[in-house]
């Protein structure tokens, strides 16, 4: 490369020309082009404050579409379809809870840059619970705007949906204790001894493939805007990511000067959303989109959900039991438990996908146990505060790491703080809810494609020339798509009739979850069909001895640095000798009998 010694790059420099190599400048042309590291910001690295805020905002926007849609889906079963203020309160609450759960998970749980948020796995049992005669016959939604009702009518409508919310809260709280028990007792971690690439690959792939309907729903309102968003993401993340743009900067040494910043590499999703959003606003003002709400293209307007912006207050602080004391029923708890089980299976796949995209080693058993338990604690908090939902790992944000190549834990924690603040300042959440549906759909299509590809990439550790492995992979994925789709069609779910309603609900919800069906099928086949360890990919996926002492010192240090508890808690716990037997506690540095259940080589890079 050339040795141009000018401190300020020439304004007419071309993309092919060289910029001065600066080993201290992460974004110098030399380091970007010649760096062998796939991840720009590794897990433990902290970007500058402006970059951290921008990337945190991107994570917030990435999870916004799925999160904000949950209250709208729950509006009908909760009888608040004509009560935008109630929907706005649920939107603020669910973001507030998501922020708290994300901080807990990234700090004390799995400690990977995983965003926590509402889960559609709990939407299905919620609808099923509200379909019981006890609730269906008492749902009398108002047919006129809520603001036009008398005070007595408003009080009746409020109590009607509050009673339903309390039933859902009780079911979520009790069923989430089961998830905490699974995590802290190590039952989920023990299963990892039998889980290899042939189980993880279909599970993660089905996370993306099962979300096709959600992506289609959002994008189909206006495919033109959806394709525009897709093209912008592809343009920014794949074509322009190698090209920096000059931005003004100031430092004591150089005073006012220009720096070359790789904005397209760091903010492709955020930039695509902003550009598509602005373009949609222009078309809305020009009356290109229809004014009739019954037409699908109406959802491409930026004012399609403007009522939420008008009716929501500026400041509202969600608090525990804000809708009253929760109620508990056996049917509700067992029905919600099915969603919790499906959520755990999905999160397990997300942990491995996130570790791979972050360029670090897969989580050991104690970290997985804490992650599952922390998700349960987050769901308990969600049930207490009353978001109408629980919390789970967000696959969309795992996909965002693959696109932006930023795996910094600090970035996700910054996004979590934004969720909490904007959950309190509900006007801002209402503003972002005006992002048109097709723009969200375009983002989802790219994200879900990334998740599916990440899942399939785990097969690189297996011998895919083996007919055994080809059969397990193909059959698990296809059956995981076909059977849940059939079960959700018409009245086919009535084929599940054990005579026990609660048991029927559990079976139906589990068999309606693609990740559960495909992942469980792959797990059974991989562990029962004869095959060598090398053929199954277990020799690469698992360390042969499976013990920390068998890893080199760098690998041991990396695992402890990434997955051990922060703030000196690990050393504090180790002072109590009995903690070595707790499955959620990090192993002692001098232990030789603590296993690391998964050890993967060939990752994109090691954490700094």
Image (cartoon, rainbow, N blue to C red):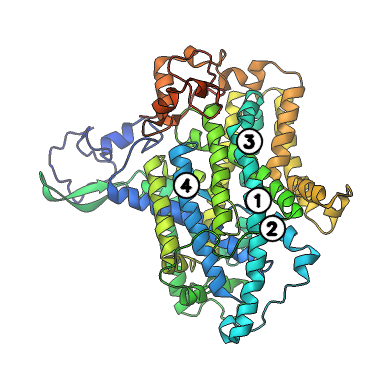
First reached walking from the N terminus: tag 2 or tag 3: 2
Judging by the rendered image, the residue that carries numbered circle 1 is: 121
The residue depicted at 62 percent of the width and 44 percent of the height is 177
The residue depicted at 36 percent of the width and 38 percent of the height is 41
Judging by the rendered image, the residue that carries numbered circle 2 is: 126
Q: Which mark is residue 182?
A: 3
Q: Position of residue 240 (x, y in %)?
A: 38, 48
Residue 8 is left or right of residue 268, and the answer is left
- SS state under label 3: helix
Residue 195 is left or right of residue 361, and the answer is right
Judging by the rendered image, the residue that carries numbered circle 4 is: 102
- SS state under label 4: helix
**Comparing labels 4 and 1, the label whose residue is closer to the camera:** 4
**Labels 3 and 1 touching (C-beta < 8 A):** no
The Cα atoms of the two marked residues, 4 and 1, are separated by 18 Å
First reached walking from the N terminus: tag 4 or tag 3: 4
The Cα atoms of the two marked residues, 4 and 3, are separated by 20 Å
Q: Position of residue 552 (x, y in %)?
A: 43, 14
Q: Position of residue 120 (x, y in %)?
A: 63, 53
Residue 30 is left or right of residue 336, and the answer is left
């Amino acid at each position: 490369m050339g040795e141009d010694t000018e401190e300020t790059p020439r304004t007419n420099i071309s993309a092919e020309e060289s910029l001065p190599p600066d080993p201290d400048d992460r974004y110098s042309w030399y380091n970007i082009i010649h760096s062998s590291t796939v991840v720009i910001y590794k897990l433990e690295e902290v970007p500058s404050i402006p970059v951290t805020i921008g990337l945190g905002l991107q994570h917030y926007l990435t999870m916004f579409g799925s999160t904000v849609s949950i209250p709208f889906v729950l509006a009908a079963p909760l009888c608040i379809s004509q009560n935008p203020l109630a929907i706005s309160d649920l939107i603020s609450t669910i973001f507030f809870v998501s922020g708290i759960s994300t901080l807990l998970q990234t700090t004390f749980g799995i400690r990977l840059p995983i965003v926590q948020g509402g889960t559609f796995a709990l939407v299905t049992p919620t609808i099923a619970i509200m379909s019981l005669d006890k609730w269906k016959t008492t749902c009398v939604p108002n047919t006129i705007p809520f603001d036009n009702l008398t005070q007595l009518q408003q009080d009746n409508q409020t109590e009607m949906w509050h009673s339903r919310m309390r039933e859902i809260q009780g079911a979520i709280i009790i069923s989430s204790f089961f998830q905490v028990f699974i995590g802290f007792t190590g039952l989920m971690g023990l299963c990892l001894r039998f889980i290899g690439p042939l189980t993880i690959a279909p599970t993660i792939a089905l996370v993306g493939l099962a979300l096709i309907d959600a992506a289609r729903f959002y994008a189909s309102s206006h495919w033109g805007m959806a394709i525009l968003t897709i093209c912008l993401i592809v343009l920014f993340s794949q074509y322009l990511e190698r090209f920096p743009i000059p931005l003004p900067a100031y430092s004591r040494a150089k005073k006012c000067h220009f720096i070359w910043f790789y904005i397209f590499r760091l903010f492709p999703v955020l930039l695509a959303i902003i550009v598509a959003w602005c373009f949609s606003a222009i078309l809305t003002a020009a009356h290109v989109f229809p004014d009739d709400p019954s037409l699908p293209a109406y959802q491409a307007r930026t004012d399609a959900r403007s009522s939420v912006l008008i009716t929501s207050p500026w400041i509202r602080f969600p608090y525990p039991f804000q809708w009253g004391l929760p109620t508990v029923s056996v049917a509700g708890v067992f029905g919600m438990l099915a969603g919790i089980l499906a959520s755990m299976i999905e999160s397990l796949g997300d942990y491995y996908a996130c570790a791979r995209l972050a360029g670090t080693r897969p989580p050991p058993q104690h970290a997985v146990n804490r992650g599952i338990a922390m998700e349960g604690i987050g769901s308990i908090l969600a049930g207490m505060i009353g978001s109408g939902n629980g919390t789970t790992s967000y696959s969309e944000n795992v996909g965002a790491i693959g696109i932006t190549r930023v795996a910094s834990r600090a970035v996700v924690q910054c996004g979590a703080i934004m969720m909490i603040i904007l959950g309190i300042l509900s006007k801002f959440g209402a503003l972002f809810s005006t992002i048109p549906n097709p723009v969200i759909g375009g983002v989802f299509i790219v994200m879900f494609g990334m998740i599916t590809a990440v899942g399939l990439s785990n097969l690189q550790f297996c011998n895919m020339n083996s007919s055994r492995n080809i059969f397990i992979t193909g059959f698990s994925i296809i059956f995981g798509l076909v059977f849940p789709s059939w079960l959700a069609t018409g009245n086919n779910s009535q084929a599940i009739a054990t005579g026990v309603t609660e048991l029927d609900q559990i079976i139906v919800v589990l068999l309606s979850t693609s990740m559960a069906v495909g992942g469980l099928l792959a797990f059974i086949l991989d562990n029962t069909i004869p095959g060598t360890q090398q053929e199954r990919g277990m020799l690469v996926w698992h360390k042969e001895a499976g013990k920390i002492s068998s890893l080199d010192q760098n690998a041991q240090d990396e695992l402890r640095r990434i997955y051990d508890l922060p703030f000196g808690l690990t050393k504090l716990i180790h002072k109590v000798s009995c903690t070595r037997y707790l499955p959620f506690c990090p192993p002692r540095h001098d232990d030789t009998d603590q296993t690391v259940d998964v050890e993967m080589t060939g990752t994109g890079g090691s954490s700094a």
